Image: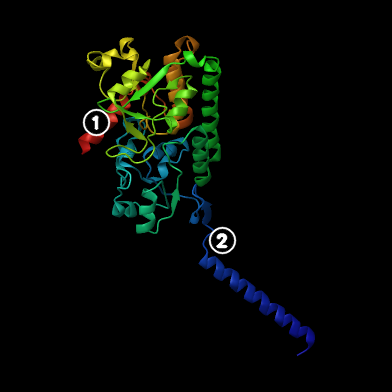
Amino acid sequence: MTKIRFICLLVSLLVILFLARQYTQEKKDPSIGKGFRTITDMKGRSFVVADPIQRIALLGGPTGQVAFMLEVQDKLCAVTNTLKMSKLVREMYPKIRLLPGPRTTSGSINIEELIQSNPDIVIAGDPDGRIVLDKTRIPVAFLEDSMGDGIVDMKREIRFYGYVFNTPDRAERYVAFLERIITMVTERTKDIPAAQRKRVFQGYSPSHLVTLGGDTFMQERIELAGCMNTAESVVTIGKRSGLHAGLGEISMEQVLEWNPEILVINNGKPDDLIKHPQWRHVKAVQNNQIYAQPAGVFIFNRPTMESAVIFPLWLASIAYPDRFEDISLPSLVKEFYKQIFGFDLNDQQANDILTGAYEVRMMKGIKNRG
């Protein structure tokens, strides 16, 4: 065998070995092959998923709304039970009734139902994501879900979804709308002296004595509206017996001491407080400044992307109507849901969002379902 032939043979063998190695790596690591990609979630975990993602399971309470924001709702294969019970979603997207709802409350997941829905990916926070990881082989993308999430976190989260679902343009559309509203509200309220800013109390539950403290997202939302959170000194993030993390219970004596000028409730009617022997001494009640908290796809006492846009504007227009008299709140709400969610709301639906009617209907539906 000549030296030249030997060298040619050696080169050929090396090429064959190289190609064989590449093929083996592609078989072992599907992220290298066609139809897969590697993504990194909000916890910094990297893993392989199908590309494109065709079946999505959204298992966080407020997260279901992003499917509509990013126009991937037809890829949903499993959702939370609360999203299925959302009256607004049921009106605008009747197919939601047919989807499995394997996640009821935090940490409560029907794993068999989830597996049967055959998702390409599950998106969830703790502890739901951990349960899925421990009991299945389904890829899980973790969210940084916290009751302390503010506007910056909302932007980061929607951009994360845009990255996962390959819809960055839709994500940026939301960010632009959010920034537009926040800028408008802050520009109109920034010159209000601290001593003249309206004092607001969020009074949840039938007792109206459950609230969101200064360490939650609500602190920022109230401040963006040019108001003051009377419960700023209250620490509520963390586990509370019988309450959702982030909510804390206070005394009637504390409310009387704070004497808020605006009261936001999510249960009952203003007349009930007007007739109450203690609540009737609160300034907000005396001046009939009692308002039901708005609600849309999800309730607004959670850090949702809906509430980040609507709540500060709604509260500011209530607190300082003369500064927003040129703004039609129902028209802006309709614009938001049309442009961001693809929901073409009628006048009644826009009004129901602003008056909290959707929260009442959603919670009634959940109770009736058991």
At which x and y percent is residue 236? 37, 35
Coordinates of residue 260 in the picture (x, y in percent): 37, 17
Q: Is disc 1 surrounded by few (<14), some (14 to 19) or many (20+) residues within 10 Å? A: few
**In the figure, residue 331 lies in which quadrant?**
top left
Q: Look at the picture and state if 99 lies above or below 136.
A: above
* Circle 2: residue type: Ile
Mark 1 sits on what residue? Answer: 364
Q: In this view, does 132 lie to the left or right of 197?
A: left
Could you tell me which residue is drawn at 36 percent across and 49 percent down? 128
In which quadrant of the rendered view does residue 232 lie?
Answer: top left
- The amino acid pointed to by label 1 is Lys
Callout 2 secondary element = loop
Query: Is 108 situated above or below 368?
Result: below
Residue 190 shows up from this direction: yes
| Towards the viewer: 265 or 358 | 265
Q: Residue 275 carries which label?
A: none
13 relative to 163 in the view: left or right: right
Q: Distance between the residues labelled 2 and 1?
A: 49 Å
Residue 199 versus residue 122: which sits nearer the camera? 199
